[in-house]
Every structure is written in C-alpha cells, then in structure tokens.
Image (cartoon, rainbow, N blue to C red):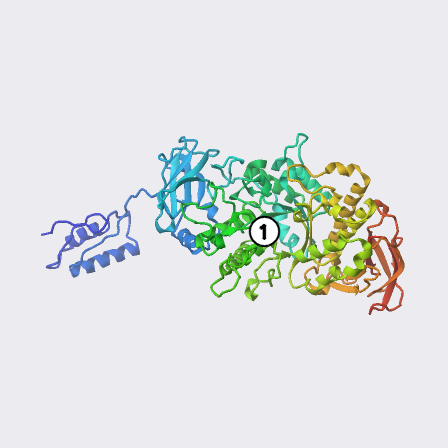
C-alpha cells in the first residue's frame, strides 16, 4: 500500500513509496510516469533516462523523490539578469541604460513601459506621471531584493509621457519625487520631469566609423573647435538653433576652417543654463533645449558625414543639489558622500560623487560608454579631473579628510578613473579620452599598466597660462620673460598634450583673446595671428574656442550668439582666413603633427635669442623625413632682415606660411616664397638660411627635397 502523498517545496505532489519487495515491471512503469511529469513524445533523452535511473535507485533505498517538473510561472517583467545584478553591485556594469530607466515594450500583447530605478533605502517606490494624475498610489514598483533596484511594468504608458519616481524612504518618513537618473530624455528646464523615449535612429556615418581610428590617433592631425551649442549661432530673434538647425552650418563651417573635430561643451541635461552644462542632472539625456535625442544623433551624423569628429565634454566630478536630481536620492546620501568634507564642492556649491560606492561607479561607467556608443561620440573631454584626484582640492586645513594612508590623494577616484579608461579603450579603442587636469599629477596620459591614469590626452594648462601671460606683455618687456615660451619643452613629452585656448580664458573679466593682446588695433591682430602660429608650431594637439578664430572683441556670453557680424570687417575676415590656412597647412604637413607626442619630432634651432624675442625651431616626421619644417617667430614689432638660422638640409626651403602676408592683414614682409640654403654651418647644423622676419610675425619654412 502507498502512504498519503506529501509535497516537497513548491513542486507537484508525488506519492512516496517504501520498498518492501521487488516491484513487478508494471510498477516500475508506473514509477517512471510519476517521475517524468510531462513525458515528451518519442524516445527519452539521455538526461531523462538518467533521471529515471536515479529515481529507481532512490526507490531501492526508500528515499523521497523530488522530481523534475515543468511549472508554469508568471515571471516578473524585467530586463535584469543575475549577471546584471552582480556587475551592478560589483561596480563594473557599463551598460546600465539598457537595464534601468524607462523602456517602452509589449508584455503579453499589451503595450506599456518597464521602469527600473536604484533606491536601496526606499520603503516603496512608485511611478507618477501624466497618465495617472501624478498619483503616488497608482503604479508601484517591486523591490528586487538586495540589489536595491525597484522595477515594474506599467501598461498603456507610451513614448512621450512624462514621469518621475515617487520615493518613500525608510528613514524619517522622507518622501520625494525624483527624475529618472537613467532617463534618455528630459523635459526642458525649468520643468524637471523625465520623458519616456527610445533611442531608435538610422545612422549614415559608416565611412567615418570605419576610419575614425586613424582620425583619432595620436599620430593624426587633431585641431579642435570648441563651441557652446546654444550660443554659437542664433536666429534673428535671438533663439538658439536646434540640433538639426545647427548641424549643416556647423559641419560646413568646421570643414571650411579645416578643423578636424568639434568639441561640444556639455550637452547633457542641466537645470541652470548659466552653468554652461557643467552642472548635470541628466547623465544619459541630452538637453532638450535644442531637441530630442534623435536630433542630436542627426547633428553628429551630419558632422561625421562631413569628416568632422565630435568630442563631448563630460562631467563625472560633481553634480548639482537640485531636489529632483541625484542629491539625497532615497532619503540617504546615495550618490554623494554624506560628510561634506568629502561630498560638497566649495567652489561650485555642488555635490561630489562617492567613487567608493560600487553602484555609483557602475552609473558613471555606463554614462561614459553611453555617449561613446549610442551617440557615436569620438571622444570625451573629462572635466575637472584635478578636483577628483585631490581630497584637499580648494579646501583649507581641517576642511578635508585624509585617505587611509594619511595622504591627500583620493584613492577611490583614482581607481575609478583608471577603470573608466580601461573600459572605454577596451570597448572603443578608436576614441580619445582627454583629461582637463591642471596640476602636475604624473602620468595622466600614460597606460594604467605602468601606473598611469590611462587617458589618451591631457590639456596643457601650463602652456596656456605661460603663453597668455607672455602675450599680454608689451613687446618691449618680452625679452625679460622669454622663459615663459621655452620652459614648456622641459616637460612637453612627459604627457600626450593638447594645447587649449578654451572658453575658460574668455570669461569672467579675463577678456577675449584679441583684447588680451597689447598695442594698437593692427598690433593686436598681428599678435593674435602670432599666438595661433605659436600654438601650431608647438608639439601637441590644438583647441580653439569659438569666436577666437576671427578675433571677437567681447568676452563670450552664453545668452547671445558670437559676433558673426565682425566678419564684415577686413581685419576679422583676414584673421579668420589665417586660421583657415594655418589649419590646412597643419593637416597637410606630417612634420607638424605626426610626432606631437614624441621628442623625435622637435628640435630647438635657437631658443636663446631673448634679446630679440625670437624663437626658431624644427618640426620633423617619420613618414616624410626629408621634409622638416623650420618655424621662426618674431615676438616684437621690429622686422628682422638677414636673420640666419641653421637647417639640417641643403636646397630650397619654401615659405609655406607667413602670418604677415597682406591676405591675413599683415604688412607684406617675407621671403618671396622661399630661400636657398647655403653651406654655412650654424646652430650645430651644416646648412643655414637667411630670412626676413616680419614684425609680430611667424614664418613656416618647409624643406623641398629634390
């Protein structure tokens, strides 16, 4: 006889049999039917036969049987796997936008949206939006346990609907409505809701994507045009252009001016327009001031189709304290440090990410990979790296907490930056990650495996400060500050440098580049042409902020367009032509870019003529070793005749650029297109050439091999 059936866990009830004698074959057949709850048609598989054999052995010793059965379960709606939970909580997930946030989809034939948000200290989370009257009791999410994620599918919520998360904290009865940290589209400020959206777009930049590894290489010419989308160009009634409206004109202008890349000041959503985008609330959402995500994709697509790379400014160093943003997200200091000595930035009144929290690292890693992958960005310029590296950045004694070893280095941020660069270059080896780092921190642009931070390039802030300080001086005094120009070569190849003349130098009372130059109007323009020539002559990639290329008189103002009307005046149009031709020569001359990051590509010819404020240098390449370029710069308004410099090759040296040409607004003094080298040794070289050096001018002399 059989005993009363009993169940084991959540499986189907199966009779328990106690063996007292050998069963007839008919009983064994019955046992097989009990073990295999839903036998498939045809012969049993090897696994099923093994299960039956195990069951028979268990019967022989009187053991309970826990059968394999198929159970219909109403699985929860989710995009998350166990692997996602592991990577997220470990701090190594870099595709969170595919898992968290809002995702329009169908479930059981019903259209709706799946929502997911990280709020580990919440007692409950619901989605409020324009479909439910912003009622926090209508659409609750389910907790996904120790992961801290809340998730749920809400039917009939579709693309374009606005929403927030209503979070009720476990602490102190705190309740708040928060924008989605992983939203891909947000309302236009001052409104703060997130918008259900998708990322569908058909790209047409296949040719660029195939070639961009070569375009972004350290051995390639990189001349960057930095701009602010909202104030580059405006409509007649003063409104900013949309992403789609700016796409064509920007691509045409960058191409005309021979820039290789544009760098966009942050286009991530930000509540305060006056922050220029550097206080971000939407780390996955482009600002809707200028259009939708697809509109921004279109703009990038057009630039790529015109051969122009796109670099995004990206800000992982801090975020604003706006209530709808990341601050105090679930009633705790979730994204930021709780202690203001580590979590509050005194310069900007913003909050600092807790880089030691694994989930925050996953959030930031995902943001970086998101812009590079989804938006086809060709690089990231990482803002305010120095503020991340130092615990005492902009703090007085007693206002900061030392690290575990008693030092001032932020070990958690250092580890994050290294991991970020490793992940980026692993997934996108054809991009550049550029550090805006203003201190002497070593090996910023060296690989992590030798102890570096792993960036591709670093802004040379020292060059910028020294150079602008020198150019601001009257020429008669420059001979006493000659070292401001020459000191850079003491460290020029310790990093992979970019030379920035950025937006930071033309705001807050600093004056425009043209205003910084001394002298009368003619001398100001001549000095600015000389400044651009000096930048191109130096090893390192180049960056110019919008308006500087045609000599804007006023400081940059984010509320108005740059002063395009100035191009109606000859000096400004001539300066613009100089930058256009300077960029063209730079792009067409390997000696000026190929060895930017190697000392093999640079030699001083004469760096000691401080009395005359003249520099002479030589640039070289591997691909065209017989075509070096000698650059001679005269930093005074006194022309120099029969000025001799030593050169490594005989033959003709062509004057490929002269900043004093009448075409550029100069006085027309130069070398009649080129000179012949004489076999007269000078400056340690077998040959020499005699040059006319124009006032406040630069000449570029390229050797022409026979």
Which residue is the site of mark 1? Answer: 383
Q: Where is residue 475 in the image (x, y as percent from the top left)?
A: 81, 54
Task: Reply above or below: 365 against 651.
Answer: above
Element under disc 1:
loop
Instruction: Give left or right: position of 8 versus 532.
Output: left
Instruction: Give left or right: position of 101 versus 374.
Output: left
Q: Position of residue 161 (x, y in %)?
A: 46, 33
Q: Dot 1: within a 10 Å radius of its alpha carbon, few (fewer than 14), some, or many (20 or more) residues?
A: many
Q: Quadrant of residue 50?
A: bottom left
Q: Where is residue 668 in the image (x, y as percent from the top left)?
A: 88, 49
Pick whichever, 106 or 127, lies toward us.
127
Q: Is residue 699 visible?
A: no
Residue drawn at x 84%, y 50% as measured from the top left: 660
Q: How many marks?
A: 1
Task: Reply above or below: 320 against 221.
Answer: above
Pick whichever, 242 or 653, lies toward us.
242
**Quadrant in the picture for the C terminus:** bottom right
Q: Where is residue 456 in the image (x, y as percent from the top left)?
A: 61, 57
Pick whichever, 449 or 188, lies toward us.
188
Q: Can residue 381 be seen in this view?
A: yes
Residue drawn at x 19%, y 50% as measured from the top left: 7
């Amino acid at each position: 006889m059989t005993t009363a059936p009993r169940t084991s866990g959540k499986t189907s009830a199966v009779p328990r049999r106690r063996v007292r004698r050998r069963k007839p074959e008919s009983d064994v057949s019955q046992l097989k039917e009990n073990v295999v709850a839903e036998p498939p048609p045809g012969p049993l598989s090897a696994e099923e036969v093994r299960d039956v054999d195990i069951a028979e052995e268990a019967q022989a010793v009187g053991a309970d049987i826990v059968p394999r059965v198929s159970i219909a379960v109403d699985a929860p709606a989710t995009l998350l796997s166990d692997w996602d939970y592991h990577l997220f909580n470990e701090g190594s997930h870099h595709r969170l936008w595919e898992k968290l946030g809002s995702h329009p989809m169908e479930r059981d034939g019903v259209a709706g949206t799946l929502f997911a948000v990280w709020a580990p200290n919440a007692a409950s989370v619901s989605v409020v939006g324009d479909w439910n009257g912003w009622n926090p009791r209508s659409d609750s999410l389910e907790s996904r346990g120790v992961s801290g994620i809340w998730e749920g599918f809400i039917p009939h919520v579709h693309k374009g609907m606005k929403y927030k998360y209503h979070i009720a904290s476990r602490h102190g009865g705190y309740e708040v409505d928060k924008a989605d940290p992983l939203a891909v589209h947000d309302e236009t400020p001052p409104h703060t809701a997130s918008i259900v959206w998708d990322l569908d777009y058909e790209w047409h930049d296949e040719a660029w994507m195939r070639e961009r590894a070569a375009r972004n290489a350290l051995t390639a010419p990189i001349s960057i045009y930095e701009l602010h989308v909202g104030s580059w160009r405006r409509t007649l009634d003063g409104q900013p252009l949309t992403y789609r409206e700016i796409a064509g004109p920007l691509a045409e202008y960058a191409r005309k001016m021979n820039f290789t890349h544009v760098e966009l000041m942050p286009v991530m959503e930000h509540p305060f327009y006056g922050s220029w985008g550097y206080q971000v609330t939407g780390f996955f959402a482009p600002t809707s001031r200028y259009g939708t995500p697809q509109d921004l994709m279109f703009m990038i697509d057009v630039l790529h189709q015109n051969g122009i790379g796109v670099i995004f400014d990206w800000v992982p160093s801090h975020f604003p304290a706006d209530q709808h943003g990341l601050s105090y997200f679930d009633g705790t200091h979730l994204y930021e440090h709780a202690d203001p000595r580590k979590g509050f930035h005194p310069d900007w009144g913003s909050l600092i990410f807790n880089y030691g929290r694994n989930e925050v690292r996953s959030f930031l890693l995902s943001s970086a990979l998101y812009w590079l992958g989804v938006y086809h960005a060709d690089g990231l310029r990482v803002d305010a790296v120095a503020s991340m590296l130092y615990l005492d950045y902009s703090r007085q004694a007693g206002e900061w907490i030392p690290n575990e070893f008693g030092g001032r280095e932020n070990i958690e941020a250092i580890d994050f930056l290294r991991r970020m660069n490793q992940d980026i270059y692993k997934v996108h080896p054809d991009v550049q990650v550029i550090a805006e780092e203003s201190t002497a921190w070593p090996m910023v642009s060296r690989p992590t495996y030798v102890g570096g931070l792993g960036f591709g390039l670093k802004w040379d802030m020292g060059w910028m400060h020294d150079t602008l300080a020198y150019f601001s001086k009257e020429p008669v005094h420059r001979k006493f500050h000659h070292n401001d120009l020459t000191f850079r070569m003491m460290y020029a190849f310790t990093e992979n440098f970019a030379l920035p003349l950025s937006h930071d130098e033309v705001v807050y009372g600093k004056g425009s580049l043209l205003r910084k130059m001394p002298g009368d109007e003619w001398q100001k323009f001549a000095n600015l042409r000389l400044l651009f020539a000096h930048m191109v002559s130096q090893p390192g990639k180049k960056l110019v902020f919008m308006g500087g290329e045609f000599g804007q008189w006023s400081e940059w103002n984010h509320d108005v367009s740059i002063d395009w009307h100035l191009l109606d005046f000859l000096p400004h149009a001539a300066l613009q032509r100089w930058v256009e031709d300077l960029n063209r020569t730079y792009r067409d001359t390997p000696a000026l870019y190929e060895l930017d990051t190697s000392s093999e590509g640079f030699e001083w010819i004469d760096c000691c003529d401080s009395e005359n404020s003249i520099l002479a240098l030589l640039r070289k390449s591997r691909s065209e070793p017989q075509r070096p370029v000698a650059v001679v710069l005269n930093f005074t308004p006194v022309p120099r005749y029969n000025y001799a410099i030593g050169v490594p090759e005989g033959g003709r040296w062509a004057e490929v650029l002269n900043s004093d040409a009448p075409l550029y607004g100069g006085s027309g003094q130069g070398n009649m297109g080129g000179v012949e080298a004489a076999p007269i040794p000078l400056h340690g070289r077998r040959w020499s050439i005699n040059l006319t050096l124009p006032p406040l001018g630069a000449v570029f002399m390229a050797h022409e091999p026979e």
